[in-house]
Amino acid sequence: MLACNVGKTDKIIRIIIGIVILALGYFFHTWLGLIGLLPILAAIFGRCFLYYPLKIDTTKKDK
């Protein structure tokens, strides 16, 4: 099972960016706005699949 690698601040930023992309797609009447679902889904599930190969983890871990 893949561990969560998206922290709280990262989730908030992703949700805002996703909403902006969705709104732009709606405003310009294009289906490309659906790309905004990707950062929103990554924030909801707490996993960014681009972070795994890059070994990035924005969550705070207890030592």
Image: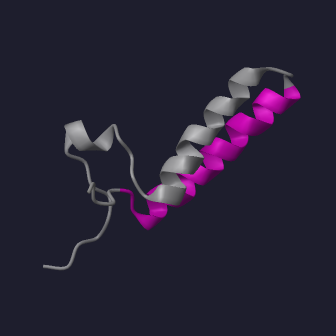
User: What's the image's color scheme?
Assistant: one colour
> Magenta residues, as a range?
6-27
Q: Relative to residue 28, is residue 42 drawn left or right?
A: left
The residue depicted at 54 percent of the width and 58 percent of the height is 44
- Name the outermost residue toward the front: 1
- Name the outermost residue toward the left: 63
Rendered position, 28 above or below 47: above
Does the magenta run of residues contain 22? yes
Rendered position, 50 above or below 55: above
The residue depicted at 55 percent of the width and 59 percent of the height is 12
The residue depicted at 84 percent of the width and 22 percent of the height is 28
Which quarter of the figure has residue 58? bottom left
Quadrant of the frame with the C terminus? bottom left
The residue depicted at 69 percent of the width and 35 percent of the height is 21
Residue 36 position, x and y percent, is 64, 37
Does the magenta run of residues contain 50? no
